[in-house]
Structure formats: C-alpha cells, structure tokens
Amino acid sequence: MPQPIRLKDHEKDARLVRNRVIVGAVAVLLLTAVLVARLYYLQVIQYEYHSTLSENNRVHVQPVPPTRGLIFDRNGVVIADNRPSFSLTVTRERTGDWEQVLDVIVEVLGLSADDRELFEKRMKQGRRPFEPVPILFELSEEQIARIAVNQFRLPGVEVVAQLVRHYPQGAHFAHSVGYVGRINEKELKELDPINYSGTHHIGKTGIERFYEPELHGQVGYEEVETNARGRVLRVLKRTDPKPGKDIVLTLDIRLQEAAEAALGGRRGAVVAIDPRTGEVLAMVSQPSFDPNLFVTGISFKDYAELRDSLDRPLYNRVLRGLYPPGSTIKPVVAVAGLDAGVITPATRVFDPGFYQLPNYDHKYRNWNRSGDGWVNLETALMRSNDTYFYDLAHKMGIDRLHQYLSRFGIGQRVSLDMFEEATGLMPSREWKRITRRQVWYPGETLILGIGQGYMQTTPLQMAQATALVASRGKWIRPHLARTIEGQPPVDPNPMPDIVVRDPSYWDQARNGMEQVMHGARGTARKVGETAAYRIAGKSGTAQVVAIRQGERYDRSKLQERHRDHALFVGFAPAENPRIAVAVMVENGESGSGVAAPVVKQVMDAWLLGEDGQLKPEYRSPPTSPEPSR
C-alpha cells in the first residue's frame, strides 16, 4: 500500500528563514562593528602616526651637492672649471630587477658590452639607500630622446643635469692640478657621509686632492614633494649649498707652455721657483696626459694605453721621479765645506784626472780624464771638477755631509701642498746599517760628494736646493697655491733658515755657479754666451747603468733608455735672483749640452720682454725687505 504524501510545513520553513536572517544580520552587524572599530583605531587613535608616515612618503629631503671651486693660474686663466652635463642615473631601490634595466639601457642606446660591464661595476659600488647612481655621462640629445621614449621600460632611471669637472687646458697641468674621479668604496668609508651626500666625484691627484676640503664646499638640502613613482612634483623648502673656494695658483700658463716647448717632446721634468717667495712658476712632467679622460670614467682601452706606455705619461717625474743629483749638488757641498771649516775659498787640490784614498789602489775618475791640475773652489765649480769634491767629501765625512745636505731638503719632502712628493734619500751610516746590514765605506762618501751613489732626489728638491743658494739660505717651502679664496696659504711647519758662519760663503758658491755659465772654461759657457743677463748654473749627469772601473762611457754600446740622464740647475739674474730652475732630461746624456739650453729658454720666457731685453723690474738688486712666510 503506497505511503501517504506529506504536505509541506510552511510554518517550519518560515522559522528557518527567520533564524537564518537573524544570524546573517547579527554577523553583518558584528563585521560592521569590527570595521568601524578598525577605522576608528586607524583614523582616530593612530591618526598622527599614519599622517606622519604618509607625509614622509610624499615629502623627501634631498641633498644638493655644492659647486666645486674653480682653479686659475696666476694671471686669471681658468685651469679647472665646471660645465653642465646631462647624466643618466639609476636608483636601485626603484628599479626592481636593475640588471634587466641595464640590459634595456644598453639596447636602447646601442652601447657595447664593455659599457654594460662598466655600468654594473658602478651599480655595485657602495652607496647610500635611495641615492641615484650616475652610470653614463655627457648624454647627447639623441640619447636623451631615446631614454624619454622608452621611459616606461626603465623604472628608476632618470636623466639629470649636473655640473661636471672640466680642464680646458688639457694636458698642460695634469701633473700639478691633477684631476677628479668617481668616489670609490674606500673613500666613501672615510668621507663625511653628510657633507658628501649627492657628490659622486672627489679629487684624486694634485691640487684637486690636496685642497679637496676647500674645493668641495658644503652640501645643501631641499624638501621635495614626490608622486607615487618617486618623481619630484615641487620643491617645498631649500637650503642652498655653500660652493667650494676658488684657488689661484702660482703657475703661469705662458711659462708652462714655454717649458714644454723647451723640452721639445723629450721625456723629462722642468720646475721653476721664485726663490724669494717659494712660488712654483712652472711644473712640467713630460709626456703628460689629458685629465678629462678620468673625470667621468676612463675606458679600459684608454687606461691600458696610458698604463702600459714605456714613456709612463701617468708618472709625475717632478714629484715622484728619483734621480742621483750628480754634479748639481756640488754648490751645496761647497757651502757645507766652507761652513764646516774643512776648506777655504783658496784651498787647492791637484787633479791628475783621478782621486785615490790613502792606502787604496782604486781610482775615482774625474770626468776630464786628463785632469785640471791645481784647482781652487771657484775653478772646481766652474769646471765641475770631481777630484776636488772627492777630496772635500772625504774631509767632511758622511756624518757632516748628511747633516748639512739634510738642511737643504735632501731626503725629505720640501713642498707645502704637493702630497705626491717622494722623500728621496739622503743616506747615512744608520740608514745603511738598517737597510743593507752593512757598514759605511769611505768610497761611498767620495761619490756622495759628486751626487752619485745612494743619494736620490726629485727635480723639485733639486730646484729647492738651488733656490736656497740663490736666497742665501732663506727657507720657504715651494707651493702651488697662491691664494685660496683670496687668502695666501700658511705653512704649519716652517723649515729653519740655513745660517752659516760667514754670509760670504753663499757668494763663493754663487760666483762659482756664475763661472759655469760665463767663465772662460765654464762647462756651460756656450749657453751663457747667448744670455742677455748673468746666469748662475750647474750641470749634472745621473748614471742609469753602472760602468766598470777603467771603462769609458760609450753611448753607442747602450740602448737609448740606458744612457745617462742630463741635469741642470740655475738661477737668474745672478745678482738679483727671480727664478730658479731645475731640468732633468731622461737619457739626455749631457747636462751642459742638453739640459742647460732648456733652463735658459725657461728663464728667457720669464725674464725677457718682447724686445728681448731684461724686464725693468729685474735689472736692479732688490731693496724690499725679506719676504714673509
């Protein structure tokens, strides 16, 4: 029998619906209450926190790097300035996959794999968070347009205008002024992180490095409003940076060019000093290089060419080159011998062409193998007689020689503002005992008296020693900065003047040097004959390779780079010194024949007027008081 069909219970269904509606309504009310409570918590209780957070996301403080100070020569010619340039920067935190972004940049601009490698290297260098990293400088208009068209593919990439260091004189002052370059990781750790915010370059060599704090200036700041993508919408507040100080150098571009021309493309160094003030008038190291290559990053190819060149254009011969001073040191040795009481101006030595120590067979040769006979001090300087100075050095002894020559700056840094300067070497008994573990031999004292052996000097030190003879012992450190923002530099560690027992000792050395140029038997008389003024000078030769006892120097048996260096020092006018010059010509062989003409050309460029005559201000002895430090 079939079951009866049950009728639908409408009352039960209605109750179920009502219960579900009530539960749903309660749930909605609870969720609404939670939402309202959360909104109240965020917008009322934590209002200040989120308001500040939002403001910080919208408003940023950005550093404004200062404008680097300019550098001028003594006549106001610009040597280092700043020029506007468009650079491509990448902010790593805003790019996402920055390596992919670099690939896009290389593709868009059609750059090489080397450029890609350089970009990656710059991105990996240490930097501060959210600091844009410049990866490409001096963009062309076409490159800027390509970046703009492809901006949607380049998050965090921007084209910005900035000032970039520029050296309008090119290679003329590369070794004195130096250059700036990108800040590396080591420098970043040592620099003030606040003052160098936004700065990407720093002085690397020369004046640019020594006076970096003065040239850099003080950083400024600006508060900017940005959009969600980090682009600046407007500047809210700005604190201007303090620009770097301008520096006027002692260098003269006309004399610099004259010195370069005098070298004639040969490897060597020229340094000219005003003996009254210590101002460096010219400083040439040849060959040179273009410092502009280093400012925005030199290419691997260009750097390899400079680094691997046999002529070493990156090597500063004036400050770093170490050479035996040769006979250029003899005037200093003469003053030392006179002051020590070892000789008098009338002391004579017989020169048969060589010198022998008592009880020794070894012969120390004079450059003139036939000898000069009996010679006194003036003749010894005029003829550059080695035998006389062998004898003088033997009588002085190494201890007194070390003491006196050190007072002239040999074996120490003499400059005020040239941090690259090498110390050179003024040997002593103690030095040899420590470095060679040997005693000092008498023969080593002899060759020290003619500027050979262990002694090593830079061309700058040779010029300073010559300036001390010209100024009669007045010690003023050579310096390149004439004024810094109108103020002269101050020597924090002045050297004591060289005081001798009798001031006439200076005259004896100066007269001997004058006879070198104008005496009947002077070694550089051919150069002196053509001078329009009196010159005091001294030639020298620095051996590159040793020659065996009894052998003669034969240039035909030596490679060009193994031949002797030619040296010459001098000052003029002899009676009223206004310029002291030291010249070193690598492998030039003859100091009198090769280096002396260079010295004279430099002096002519400084002392002579357009009419070829001595300028009026150089014709009479000085009447002004001693120059201040």
Image: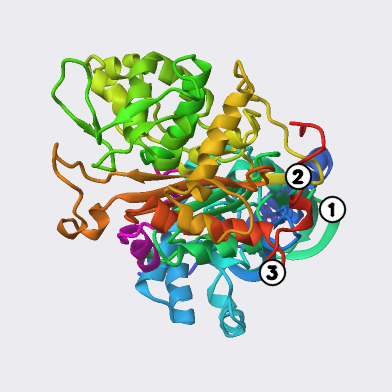
Residue underneath mark 2? 484
Label 1 sits on a secondary structure element that is strand
Q: Which dot marks residue 238?
A: 1
User: Label 1 vs label 2: CA separation?
Assistant: 28 Å
- Magenta stretch: give its range: 301-321
Could you tell me which quadrant the N terminus lies in? bottom left
Quarter of the view holding residue 264? bottom left
Residue 166: name its quadrant. bottom right
Residue 347 in view here: yes
Q: CA distance from mark 3 to mark 1?
A: 21 Å
Question: What amino acid type is highlighted by mark number 3?
Answer: Pro
Nearest the viewer among 189 and 462 is: 462
Residue at point 38%, 76% (across, down)? 112
In the rendered image of this protein, does residue 90 appear above or below residue 387? below
**Mark 2 is on which residue type?**
Ile
Percent position (x, y) of residue 148?
Answer: 61, 80
Predominant secondary structure, magenta span: loop
Residue 342 location, quadrant: top left
In the rendered image, residue 302 lying in the magenta stretch gets the answer yes
Residue, disc 3: 84
Toward the viewer: 124 or 438?
A: 438
Query: Which tag is nearer the camera, tag 2 or tag 3?
Result: 2
